[in-house]
Image: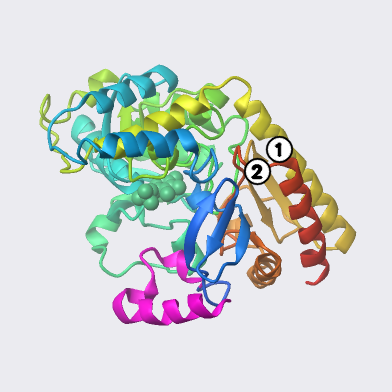
Amino acid sequence: MGEKSSLMFERAKKYIPGGVNSPVRAFGSVGGTPPFIKKAHGAYITDVDGGEYLDYVCSWGPMILGHAPQAVIEAVNRVANDGTSFGAPTELEVELAGKVVEVVPSIELVRMVSSGTEATMSAIRLARGYTKRDRIIKFSGCYHGHVDSLLVQAGSGVMTFGIPGIPGIPAELAKLTVSLPYNNLEKVSEVLEKEGDSIAAVILEPVAANMGVVLPRADFLKGLRELTARHGVVLIFDEVISGFRVALGGAQEYYGVTPDLTCMGKIIGGGLPVGAYGGKKEIMECISPVGPVYQAGTLSGNPLAMAAGLATINALQASGLYDDLDKKGAYLEKGLQEAAAKSGVTATINRIGSIMTVFFTGTPVTDYESAKTSDTGKYAKYFHNMLDNGVNLAPSQFEACFVSVAHSYDDLDRTIRVAEKALAGL
Ligand SMILES: *Cc1c(COP(=O)(O)O)cnc(C)c1O
C-alpha cells in the first residue's frame, strides 16, 4: 500500500479502535493496510497516494449510480445552502416517503431513520409491540446491522472474523433469537408449528448478501409468507442491500412476495446516512405518535440525506436501467467464470442483477454452512492480486461485489483481464 495510507493507518489507530469506524474496513481477514480514500468519481476511487482503483465496493451498495453522480451532488449542494437540519417536518421527507410508497409494493407507510441498523432495530421492536410476542426467527449468515437481538449467527464482519457469541449481548436477550439455516423451510415450519404463538417476527434478507450473495430457493420466500401468515407472525424483509438494487421495488417486486414490513438503507440515502422501515398501515400505525411503540431520531429525515435519496431514486426510475445493470452483471459473471476455468481455479459464482460473489469452493452455496466451505486464504490472495492491479473488491470473501451504472464494458473487460492474471497466480 502507498506510503501516505500506511502512515495514516498508523495515526488512525492512535485515535480510533483498530483505526476504522467499521470493522471490515481494517483488512483484518485479507491482511495488509487499507488504502485511505481521497475522492471518487463514477466507477473509480482514488486514494491519498494517488492510486486509482476500479471500485466494486461502491460504499457497500449505496453508490448504484457510481460515485459523485451529478444529479445527487447538485441536489445536496442546493439543499445545504438553505440549512442542514431543523428538527421539524420538511417537504423533502414527504417527497421521499411518497416515492418509497410508490415504488416498493408492500409499503403503505414509511418512517425514515439514519441507518440500516436503526431500521431493523425499530422494525423488530414494532413487530414485538404489534404481536405482543418476544421471540424472533432469523437466518444464519444474514446480517441485519449491529442490533443486539440480530447479532446471533450473523453474516458480514461477524462471519468474516468468526466471532461465536458476542460479548456485551446479554444471554437472556440472545435467547429470544432463534437462528435457522437459510433456504430451509422445513426448519421454520417445525419451529412455528411447535412455538409459533411466541414468535413475533421472521426477519431475513430476501436475497442474502452478507455471507456473500446467496439466492433464495424457488419456494423459500413464498413458503415463509404462507407460514408466517398462518401463525400470525410478522414477516420482515431486510432489503437494505436488495432494495432498489435487484429491482426498483426490491426483492419483493422481483420475486412477487409481499412482506408485512420492509427495512431499507444504503441506496435509499444515495451515499448519505439514511435508513427506513415501512409496511402495512395497520402495523405501522402502532408507532408513536399514532401508537404506543416509541421510536424517534434527532436527524431522522435530514434534508441533505432526503435530497440525496430522492435524486438517486429519481435517476433509478429511468427506463431500462435495471436491464442494463443485469446485462453488465451477467457479462462480468461470464468473464470471471471463464477466467476461473482457464486458470483451473474451483469457484462458485452466485449472482442476481448487479450483485455477485465469487466463492472459492466447488460446493453450491445456498446457506451459511456451504458459504463457509470457501477457501478464505485463496480469496485474500485473489483480493490483493486484484487490488495491486487497480481493482478494488470487498476485503472479505463473505461480501458482495457491486456493479454500478457507471461501470462501462471497457471497465468490465479490464476487470476480467486482471482477474485472469490474479486467478492464475493463486
Ligand atoms: C448494511 C446492512 C445493514 C445495516 O445497515 P447500516 O446502515 O450499516 O447500519 C442491515 N441489513 C443489511 C441486509 C445490510 O446489508
Distance in Å between CA atoms under marks 2 and 1: 8 Å
Q: In the rendered structure, which amino acid carries the disc numbered 1?
A: Lys
Sequence-first tag of 2 and 1: 1
Tag 1, which secondary structure?
helix
Across and down, in percent, residue 177 comes to 33, 50
Point out the image quarter for the C terminus. Answer: bottom right
Q: Which residue is drawn at 52% across and 69% down?
A: 35
| Relative side of 210 to 266, left or right | right
Q: In the rendered structure, which amino acid carries the disc numbered 2?
A: His
Tags 2 and 1 in contact by the CB under 8 Å rule?
yes
Across and down, in percent, residue 399 comes to 55, 55
| Relative side of 287 to 415, left or right | left
Across and down, in percent, residue 384 comes to 66, 70
* Residue nearer the viewer, 162 or 232: 162
> Can you name the residue that lies furthest to the right here?
342
Magenta residues? 1-27
Residue 44 visible in the shown view: yes
Across and down, in percent, residue 73 comes to 41, 39
What color scheme is it? rainbow
Q: Name the residue under label 2.
A: 407
Point out the image quarter for the N terminus. Answer: bottom right
| Residue 170 found in image quarter | bottom left
> For disc 2, does the CB lie below 8 Å from ligand 1?
no
* Residue nearer the viewer, 368 or 111: 111
8 is within the stretch colored magenta: yes
Numbered badge on residue 328: 1
Q: Residue at x 25, y 35 (%)?
A: 303
Q: How crowded is mark 2: few (under 14 residues within 10 Å), some or many (20 or more)?
A: many
Tag 2, which secondary structure?
loop
